[in-house]
């Protein structure tokens, strides 16, 4: 874990203390990611002889960024991204263009609404990205870090996010 990521995560956590807000983020982030890649999944691209989509190409830089912040979390997010890119590919292969755009709009509305509700209702403060726009890219890392901690992995992340590892006594 880079020291930059450690500092950013510690700052991000201050905006995400309420468990309901964190739950809203799981859905909101997944919906917004899917909404971002869905339209790009319409455009096939051939790279080095392999058929892919503009969505896959667009995701690569942010995946590299996440790997650089923390390799294990980045690898887990890669797995989630592959799943969401696959879902997007299935949707565009079965939906009309109008249907795909309608679904994209719904995903954006529900994704943004879940973030707003999480912060306004449960956290009672503005989202972290209002104060620091780079936090837009930390959401997926935070959600994956919470999953790792819940599964009993990454005591180093638990110290940052929870203040002490689960099961530790003061």
Image (spheres, rainbow, N blue to C red):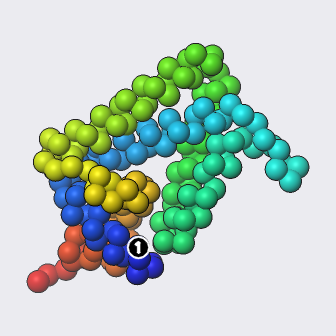
Image vertical order of residue 28 relative to residue 148, above or below: above
Residue 20, visible in the rendered structure: no
At 41% from the left and 77% from the top, the residue drawn is 4
Residue drawn at the location 37% of the way across and 56% of the way down: 133
Which quadrant would the N terminus be assigned to in this image?
Answer: bottom left
Which residue is pictured at 60% across the width and 32% down the height? 39
**Above-or-below relation of 163 to 119:** below
Relative height, residue 1 to residue 11 (above, below): below
Side (left or right) of 4 relative to 88 = left
Dot 1 alpha-carbon crowd within 10 angstroms: few under 14, some 14 to 19, many 20 or more: some
For the C terminus, the quadrant is bottom left
Q: Is residue 126 visible?
A: yes
**Rendering coords of residue 89 (x, y %):** 65, 34
Q: Answer with the quarter of the image where residue 11 lies.
A: bottom left
Q: Is residue 132 left or right of residue 168?
A: right
Along the line of sight, the residue nearer the viewer: 97 or 146: 97
In this picture, residue 140 sits left or right of residue 91: left
User: Does residue 67 appear to the left or right of 22 in the view shown?
Assistant: right
Query: For numbered disc 1, what is the local secondary structure?
Result: helix
User: In the orientation shown, which residue stands out farthest toward the right?
Assistant: 49
Where, by quadrant of the figure, is residue 159 drawn? bottom left
**Image location of residue 32, percent across then percent down:** 44, 40
Q: Is residue 125 above or below residue 17?
A: above
Numbered circles on residues, count: 1
Q: Which of the two residues, 140 or 153, is positioned nearer the viewer here? A: 140
Q: Which residue lies under the disc numbered 1?
A: 5
Q: Residue 21 at x, y = what percent? A: 23, 48
Can you give x and y, in whole percent of width and height, for residue 152 in the image?
A: 34, 69
């Amino acid at each position: 874990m880079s020291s930059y990521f450690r500092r950013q995560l510690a700052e991000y956590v201050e905006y995400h203390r309420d468990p309901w807000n964190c739950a809203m983020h799981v859905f909101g982030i997944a919906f917004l990611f899917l909404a971002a890649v869905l339209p790009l999944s319409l455009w096939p691209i051939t790279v080095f002889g392999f058929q892919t989509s503009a969505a896959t190409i667009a995701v690569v830089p942010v995946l590299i960024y996440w790997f650089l912040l923390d390799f294990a979390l980045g690898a887990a997010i890669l797995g989630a991204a592959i799943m969401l890119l696959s879902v997007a590919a299935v949707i565009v292969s079965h939906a009309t263009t109008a249907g795909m755009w309608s679904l994209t709009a719904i995903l954006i509305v529900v994704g943004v609404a879940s973030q707003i509700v999480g912060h306004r209702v449960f956290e009672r403060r503005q989202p972290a990205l209002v104060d620091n726009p780079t936090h837009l890219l930390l959401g997926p890392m935070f959600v994956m870090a919470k999953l790792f901690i819940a599964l009993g992995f990454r005591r180093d992340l638990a110290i940052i996010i929870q203040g002490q590892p689960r099961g530790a006594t003061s």
